[in-house]
Amino acid sequence: MLLASPLAEAFAPLTSLRTPHTRSTDIGRGLPHNHQFHSESTADSRSLCKLHLGSARVSMHPHANLAVTIDQPLLPSANSKFAKSALAFLMSDVVKAAMAAFLLAMVLTILVRSSGSFIKVFRGFTKMIQKVMAGVSKFVKGTLLRVTDRLKQPNRDGVPMSFDDTENDGWGVCTLRSKKRLGRTSFVQYEFDLPKSNQVLPLKLGQQAALCCLDNTGSVAKADFYVYHPQVNAMMGRFSIVAPNKGSLDNEYDVGGDAANFVRVLKNDLKVGDEIAVKPGDRKLEYRGQHFPVTDMVYIASGVGIVPILEQVRAVLPNGSSSVKSVTVVWIDENADDFDVISDHLEREYYKYTTKLAVSCVVDNMRVNTLADNYSIVNAIPEFIPGTMAVLSGARPVQRKAANYLVSRGYPQDSICEL
């Protein structure tokens, strides 16, 4: 997701290091010196310098008792006295302690001066280990997810629900099954039952479902929605949509006037078990560019516009499923909690295809700001290369801002698709 991926960001690598006698710190900011090591060394040097000097006692004997030899003078000369005194001083405990302290101080100085280089090397080594471990973790997790998907018992083929244009203007009937708030997000999931448990809506990639009902006053409410697939495989016998759960004006900004009115009826007027008309709606996913094949996909979604993007990402990522080699998803929302609605699904796809998918989830208010104002958005959107297709989804005002921004970045107008 830049979820900027994700997704957000493999979504949990090692970011801190703790070593004995060392403060915990972020690896990216460097490691502090080992203060405990210094204090212990300083204490040792002080202890070595604590010496107790005893008082020297000198006994003076009468000259008559001195031994006299012909090869030695009766009394030592001044030079001899000085030499012996100097030798005694050099061999004293004071000098030994001083020399030991000096050598210890010199070793400590060398270690301190070289500790900066050592820490830099250690930091570089730690970062390298982190990257290696993160890469191994992503590879293992992605491999397990892909293997798990293949080992899962695939759903039996559903029966496409039939729609006859000659009867009831092509409308079929479904039943409101449930209303569910999605965690702390500002979205509500509405689930509907199809007439038969083995039926599926026959929708193509990028195609909406048209819904129609009556409100409490008898007025017609009609709108198109993208179907929400929380699982990889389509649910048989039912389908879901995700709608904003805000005030009327905010809902209208996010999904438009007709959809906002239909959401109002779903929330306030309809009860579980009420019937709603349904049929396949418009398909807006279309590439009008001049460069074939399409090799790079750039998705920019705002708010609930992430719903159709998730389905398309799942469709183009698997190897051999399309000509697409790189996918970038930039999801913009005013509320960070809204990312919880689909971030887990995007994170799963990221781990499965780490070399192909990049996800960025950006908190920003696009009502007052532009894409160019946000450094994270600017960095997340790649430069245009032939074969790139950009798909915009979400609030109409945000789509227009995104289209203008992409054109300013060199994207041809015919390479941009607005859902």
Image (spheres, rainbow, N blue to C red):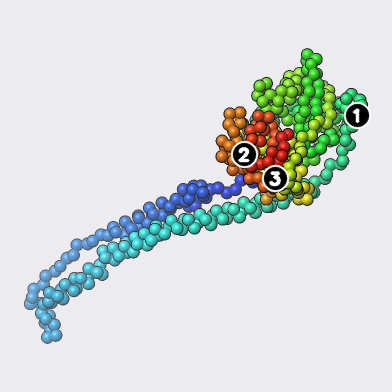
Which residue is located at x 47 percent, y 55 percent? 119
Dot 2 or dot 3: first in sequence order is 3
**Residue topped by disc 2:** 408
Q: Amino acid at mark 1?
A: Asp
Front residue of 199 and 32 = 199
Q: Is residue 59 above or below residue 172?
A: below
Q: CA distance from mark 2 to mark 3?
A: 15 Å
Exactly how many numbered labels are in the figure? 3
Quadrant for the C terminus in the image = top right
Q: Quadrant of residue 88?
A: bottom left
Which residue, given by chain and number where applicable, does mark 3 sit on?
388
Name of the residue lying farthest toward the right: 166
Q: Which residue: 75% across, 20% down?
A: 265
Left or right, residue 81 beside residue 348: left
Q: Would you say residue 261 is visible in this rendering?
A: yes
The furthest residue to the top? 217
Sequence-wise first label, 2 or 1: 1
Residue 12 is situated, as x and y percent measured from the top left of the image, at: 61, 45
Q: Residues within 10 Å of mark 3 (few under 14, many from 20)?
A: many
Give the distance between the C-alpha atoms of the residues marked 1 and 3, in whole angstroms: 38 Å
Q: Nearer the viewer, mark 1 or mark 3?
A: 3
- Left/right of residue 418 with respect to residue 170 in the rendered view: left
| SS label for mark 2 | helix
The mark closer to the camera, 2 or 3, is: 2
Report the side of 107 relative to 325 (left or right).
Answer: left
| Residue at the image position 60 percent from the left and 36 percent from the top | 371
Q: What residue would you read off at disc 1?
A: 164
Q: Secondary structure at mark 1?
A: loop
**Which residue is depicted at the point 8% across and 73% down?**
62
Kind of residue at disc 2: Ser
